[in-house]
Image (cartoon, rainbow, N blue to C red):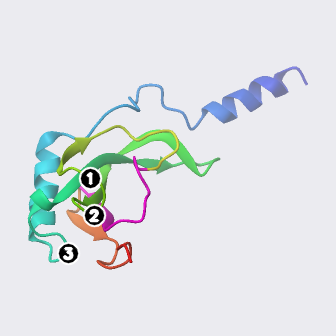
C-alpha cells in the first residue's frame, strides 16, 4: 500500500521527457522551406502581405490531451493579413505557449495550418474560413 503513491507518481511522469526543450523553435531552413511552399500557394501568395507566426506543434499525450513536449516534425503556422487590423508583416518564430493559442484571435483574414517536415505534407484551413466579414 505504501508503494501506491509512488506508482501513481511514476505513471504520471511516464509521459514526460525531461530531455526535451519545450522552448525550442523551428530552424530557419525549415521555416524558409515552409515559406517557399506558402508563397506558391494560391491562398497566400506574396509573403510581404502577411504576418507569419511559426512554432512546433505539441505531441498528443497518452494520459492527457496535450503534452508540453514539442512535436519537432510538425511546424504549425498562423498567418494574418497585414492591414486588416493593426498587423505588421514579418516573421515571428516562437515556442509553443502553455495555452496553445496564437498571439491574437480577433476576427481578421487569417490562415492556419501545419507542415509535416518528414513527409513535406502541407495542410491548411480553407482560404475563406477565417476571413473577416
Indicate which disc, 3 or 2, sits on the residue closer to the N terminus. 3
The residue located at (31%, 68%) in the rendering is 109
**Residue 38 point in image, percent of width and height:** 16, 64
Query: CA separation, marks 3 and 2?
Result: 16 Å
Residue 87: give its label: 1
- The answer to whether residue 42 is above or below residue 26 is below
Q: State which mark lies toward you, 3 or 2.
A: 2
Magenta stretch: residue 25 in it?
no
Q: Residue at x 27, y 49 (%)?
A: 53
Give, as a single range, the part of the protein colored magenta. 102-117
Q: Is the C-beta separation of discs 1 and 3 under 8 Å?
A: no
Residue 84 - label: 2
Of mark 1 and mark 3, the one earlier in the sequence is 3
Q: Residues within 10 Å of mark 1 (few under 14, many from 20)?
A: some
Look at the picture and state if 9 lies above or below 32.
above
* Marks 2 and 1, how far apart at CA: 7 Å
Q: Is residue 16 left or right of residue 27?
A: right
Residue occupied by mark 3: 43
State the SS at label 3.
loop
Label ID, residue 26: none
Q: Residue furthest right?
A: 1
**Residue 44 x, y percent position in the rendering:** 17, 69
Amino acid at each position: 500500500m505504501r508503494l501506491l503513491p509512488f506508482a501513481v507518481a511514476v505513471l504520471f511522469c511516464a509521459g514526460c521527457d525531461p530531455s526535451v526543450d519545450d522552448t525550442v523553435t523551428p530552424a530557419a531552413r525549415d521555416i524558409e522551406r515552409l515559406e517557399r511552399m506558402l508563397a506558391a500557394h494560391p491562398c497566400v501568395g506574396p509573403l510581404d502581405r502577411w504576418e507569419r507566426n511559426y512554432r512546433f506543434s505539441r505531441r498528443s499525450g497518452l494520459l492527457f490531451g496535450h503534452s508540453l513536449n514539442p512535436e519537432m516534425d510538425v511546424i504549425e503556422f498562423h498567418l494574418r493579413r497585414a492591414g486588416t487590423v493593426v498587423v505588421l508583416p514579418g516573421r515571428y518564430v516562437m515556442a509553443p505557449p502553455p495555452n496553445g493559442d496564437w498571439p491574437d484571435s480577433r476576427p481578421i483574414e487569417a490562415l492556419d495550418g501545419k507542415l509535416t517536415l518528414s513527409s513535406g505534407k502541407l495542410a491548411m484551413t480553407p482560404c475563406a474560413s477565417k476571413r473577416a466579414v
